[in-house]
Amino acid sequence: MIRPILLYPDPRLRQVAAPVTEVTDEIRTLAQDMLETMYAAPGVGLAAPQVGLLLRLFVMDCVKEEGAPPRPLVLINPEILWTSDETSVYEEGCLSLPGEYAEVRRPARVRMRWRDLDQNEHEEEFAGLWATCAQHELDHLNGKLFIDHVGPIKRQLITRRMEKLKRERAREAAQKGAGSGAALSGSAGNNASSRLVSR
Ligand code: ZN
């Protein structure tokens, strides 16, 4: 099931998410839904707070070679164990900020540890887009967004545009009689973030 993605600004995107204590059927369903939602957007990563659940869980798949098999990863309670001194810059986008992009500098490689849906522990060093995406998604679990890595002027500009977009969506929803709930979660959809995200 595709879940609605919260749009910035939304207070839920600014909270620190709680650890997952047990992998229940609800968590399995959530992870499946998040993968489905991410692929449909399309995106390369999605964190649970973006669908309104304040849990330390995100999904990602940064395979972008044409015809290559997908590699859907579900990361539960992820931690960064190590980051490289070497950095890289990517133009990042986010499904919660459709149409907005900014260059963000982050460590070029990270070593992460997490659990999967079968409670198995994994450790892996990510590089390239995988490293950027993993750090971007982990930020979401701490209430942080990619715009926090850019200067205040650009951040303010993006915030104003997003507030305007949300007002427009709310108006459209009201016109359709769909109510404000639909506007809050608007299916961010098609022109979703896509340099970080395109495949
Ligand atoms: Zn994001």
Image (cartoon, rainbow, N blue to C red):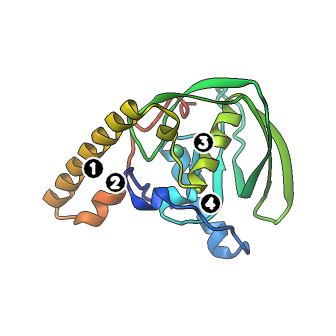
Query: Is residue 172 left or right of 44 when viewed as pictured?
Result: left
Mark 3 CB lies closer than 8 A to ligand 1: yes
Left or right of residue 189, residue 160 in this image: left
Question: What residue is drawn where x is 65% and y is 42%?
Answer: 135
Residue 90 lies, in percent from the top left, at 58, 26
Q: Residue 166 got which mark?
A: 1
> Considering only order in the chain, which callout, 4 or 2, is on the residue closer to the N terminus?
4
Residue contact between numbered discs 1 and 2, judged by CB atoms under 8 Å: yes
Q: Amino acid at mark 3?
A: His
Q: Residue at x 67, y 75 (%)?
A: 25
Q: Residues within 10 Å of mark 3 (few under 14, many from 20)?
A: many
**Residue 136, label in figure:** 3
Amino acid tagged 4: Gln
Q: Which mark, by number, is residue 50?
A: none
For numbered disc 3, what is the local secondary structure?
helix
Location of residue 112 in the rendering, given as x and y in whole percent from the top left corner: 79, 46
The answer to whether the residue labelled 3 contacts the one labelled 4, judged by CB atoms less than 8 Å apart, is no
Q: Position of residue 145 (x, y in %)?
A: 51, 45
The one of 91 and 154 positioned closer to us in this rendering: 154
Q: What number is the disc on residue 32?
A: 4
Mark 2 is on which residue type?
A: Gly
Residue type, numbered disc 1: Lys
How packed is label 4: few (under 14 Cα within 10 Å), some, or many (20 or more)? some
Tell me the CA gap for discs 2 and 4.
Answer: 20 Å
